[in-house]
């Protein structure tokens, strides 16, 4: 996810902004840029950008100084609209280079805005959604409007989310701010003000901060700030610089699990349309008519993305009546698989660079198939080489074991399945309405993190686990077991409940626990039968169950309750306790959970 930093004060701002951008590096980025008034060159306003690491940007500004008391803003970009390159990096400017801004968030209606501004003569340089904001303000400044009024009129036209920090060249002693949906915090110092998209960047610099609220605007100068319309609340910042990298979290994995609700909202924002009972997926619009005629879908992926594909298979079958098959990319690429007309191939990948998935995609391309992608990393190979696709917008995932990407993939898959079919309006309505509730329900699970930690502590002595699930919870069981394997190096395998009798039950005794996904759905009773059989063999059971289920609490050893949801969406809730369980288990065993042994975040070799 992108980072914003800014400074206005008596000190030289450029090194401060660069150092604060560095503190946001952990969020991941692919390019960076700054805007400032050069202390040489008649205090000219300069915008400098570089692709890749901040070191590249620093090289290009070696020996350059910003003028104290003037505004400095900076940004680290993680590409969402347009590939990572210098032109697309922030800051962005209007036609005349007078309005200079950095932005986090998404301008959903940027295409329409861009079209109408282009007709009015505005010239766009980048492929970003952000650039339209600078041109909108330029347009707003016409007719003698002052800057705050021009900003206001521009923001009214924007649909989407933003945290904006803006410099107006004609007024170098101010930084303008606006927030809607994306975080922005102001650091209040003596004769100086800072801005950051994440308070971790301000640790050790200021003790007082103001978290901008949605709809608030602000203007900062050296000795003052105005923030409104809601009254700003000054809060104290209790964060040491050491804590800054991962924020308040000890590990990226935990941080990323806790980002779940936000990540899911990003996957749904601007796409899920409860009012019209529909889903809008801009990335598929060009192939929409072709896509709606396909007779079969093949989903191809590796690892966690493969398991999200297995949940996706059920979504496509139920929500779109579409026969679907999920295939491991490493197998698909070598299989002599018949290519039937009317079959599309969907590639799921967080990194967009996994070697097997890419090779499978190239095979499908050679076979002239309609290829689609669900990819998190913008501009990655799989994103570029598929004909059409949907981005996750989940932000960078740093923990090697995938967590938030899985959740986001499920959110996109459910929407894609709804997008593909106009039938089944009633079911679509139920799922769309419930999807919108899922982020809040995940939050209620996250609040019980300590309870899961205690469960991990209780089960820490075991060396083997079976994760059991049926229906939508079968792939969830597989993914839950994968998480435990990856992070804690204990043996864990996922099984479909119905298969228990065909082998795994032979393993069960008092020393072999089962983690059971037993939420209230159409196969609940079947799961209960499984659990009775396990109990008869003295196997310890930890069940994930629906809140209020008193019966199960009597049957199993331990139970973790999750909120009730539509049974198709249960994986989006049930995976959270399993991710947290694996995390705590790994930490308690003393492992480096962010970088488990022998594993790589992106497997770019076969
Ligand atoms: C590696 C990662 C996994 C990931 C898999 C597929 O094994 O450690 O977390 O699920 O690759 O990666 P992709 O980027 O294609 O989703």
Image (cartoon, rainbow, N blue to C red):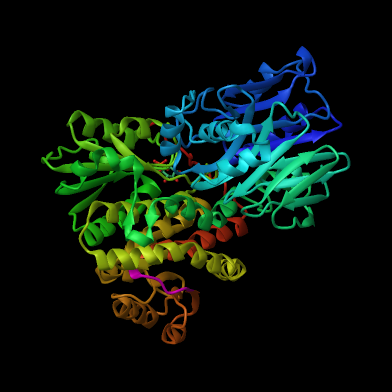
Can residue 265 be found in the magenta stretch? Answer: no
Q: Quadrant of residue 586?
A: bottom right
Q: Position of residue 102 (x, y in %)?
A: 61, 34
Report the span colored magenta: 562-568
Image quadrant containing the N terminus: top right
Q: Quadrant of ligand 1?
A: top left
Q: Quadrant of residue 300?
A: top left
Instruction: Tell me, yes or no, if residue 164 can be seen here.
Output: no
Question: Is 541 on the left-hand or right-hand side of 594?
Answer: left
Question: Is 153 on the left-hand or right-hand side of 371?
Answer: right
Residue at 83 percent of width and 30 percent of height: 69
Q: Quadrant of residue 34?
A: top right
Residue at 48 percent of width and 32 percent of height: 128
Q: Is residue 339 above or below residue 426?
A: above
Instruction: Tell me, yes or no, if residue 454 can be seen here.
Output: yes
Q: Position of residue 310 (x, y in %)?
A: 30, 55
Q: Is residue 45 above or below residue 251?
A: above
Question: Is 290 on the left-hand or right-hand side of 70?
Answer: left
């Amino acid at each position: 996810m992108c980072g914003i930093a800014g400074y206005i004060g008596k000190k030289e701002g450029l090194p401060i902004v660069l150092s604060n951008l560095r503190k946001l590096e952990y969020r991941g980025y692919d390019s960076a840029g700054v805007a400032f008034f050069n202390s040489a060159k008649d205090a000219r306003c300069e915008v400098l950008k570089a692709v890749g690491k901040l070191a590249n940007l620093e090289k290009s500004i070696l020996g350059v100084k910003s003028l104290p008391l003037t505004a400095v803003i900076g940004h680290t970009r993680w590409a969402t609209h347009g590939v990572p390159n210098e032109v697309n990096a922030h800051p962005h400017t209007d036609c005349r280079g007078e309005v200079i801004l950095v932005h986090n968030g998404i301008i959903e209606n940027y295409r329409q805005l861009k079209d109408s501004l282009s007709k009015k003569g505005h010239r766009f340089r980048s492929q970003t959604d952000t650039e339209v904001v600078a041109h909108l303000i330029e347009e707003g400044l016409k007719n003698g409007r002052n800057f705050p009024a021009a900003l206001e009129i521009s923001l009214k036209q924007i649909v989407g989310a933003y945290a904006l920090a803006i410099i107006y060249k004609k007024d170098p002693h101010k930084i303008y701010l606006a927030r809607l949906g994306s975080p922005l915090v102001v650091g209040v110092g003596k004769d100086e003000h800072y801005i950051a998209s994440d308070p971790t960047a301000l640790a050790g610099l200021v003790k007082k901060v103001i978290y901008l609220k949605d709809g608030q605007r602000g203007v900062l100068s050296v000795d003052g700030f105005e923030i409104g319309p809601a009254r700003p609340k000054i809060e104290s910042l209790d964060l040491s610089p050491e804590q800054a990298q991962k924020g308040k979290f000890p590990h990226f994995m935990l941080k990323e699990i806790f980002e779940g609700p936000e990540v899911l909202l990003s996957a749904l924002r601007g796409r899920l349309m409860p009012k019209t009972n529909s889903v809008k997926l801009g990335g598929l619009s060009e192939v929409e008519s072709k896509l709606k005629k396909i007779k079969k879908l093949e989903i191809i992926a590796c690892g966690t993305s493969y398991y999200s594909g297995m949940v996706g298979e059920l979504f496509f079958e139920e929500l779109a009546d579409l026969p679907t098959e999920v295939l491991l990319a490493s197998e698909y690429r070598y299989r002599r698989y018949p290519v039937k007309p009317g079959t599309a191939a969907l590639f799921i990948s967080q990194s967009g660079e996994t070697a097997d998935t890419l090779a499978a995609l190239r095979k499908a391309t050679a076979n002239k198939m309609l290829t689609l992608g669900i990819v998190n990393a913008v501009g990655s190979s799989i994103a570029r080489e598929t004909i059409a696709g949907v981005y996750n917008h989940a932000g960078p995932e740093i923990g090697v074991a995938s967590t938030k990407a899985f959740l986001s993939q499920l959110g996109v898959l459910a929407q894609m399945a709804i997008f593909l079919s106009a039938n089944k309006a009633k079911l679509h309505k139920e799922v769309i309405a419930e999807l919108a509730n899922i982020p809040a329900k995940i939050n209620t699970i996250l609040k019980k993190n300590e309870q899961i930690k205690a469960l991990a502590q209780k089960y820490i002595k075991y060396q083997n686990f079976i994760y059991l699930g049926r229906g939508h919870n079968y792939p969830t069981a597989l993914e839950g077991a994968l998480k435990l394997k990856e992070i804690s190096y204990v043996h864990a395998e996922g099984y479909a409940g119905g298969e228990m009798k065909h082998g795994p039950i032979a393993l069960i005794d008092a020393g072999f626990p089962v983690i059971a996904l037993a939420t209230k759905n159409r196969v609940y009773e079947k799961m209960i039968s499984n659990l009775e059989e396990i109990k008869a063999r003295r196997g310890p059971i930890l069940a994930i169950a629906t809140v209020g289920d008193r019966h199960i609490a009597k049957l199993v050893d331990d139970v973790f309750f999750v909120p009730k949801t539509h049974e198709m969406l249960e994986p989006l809730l049930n995976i959270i306790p399993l991710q947290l369980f694996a995390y705590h288990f790994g930490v308690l065993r003393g492992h480096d959970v962010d970088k488990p042994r022998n594993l790589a975040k992106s497997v770019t070799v076969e």
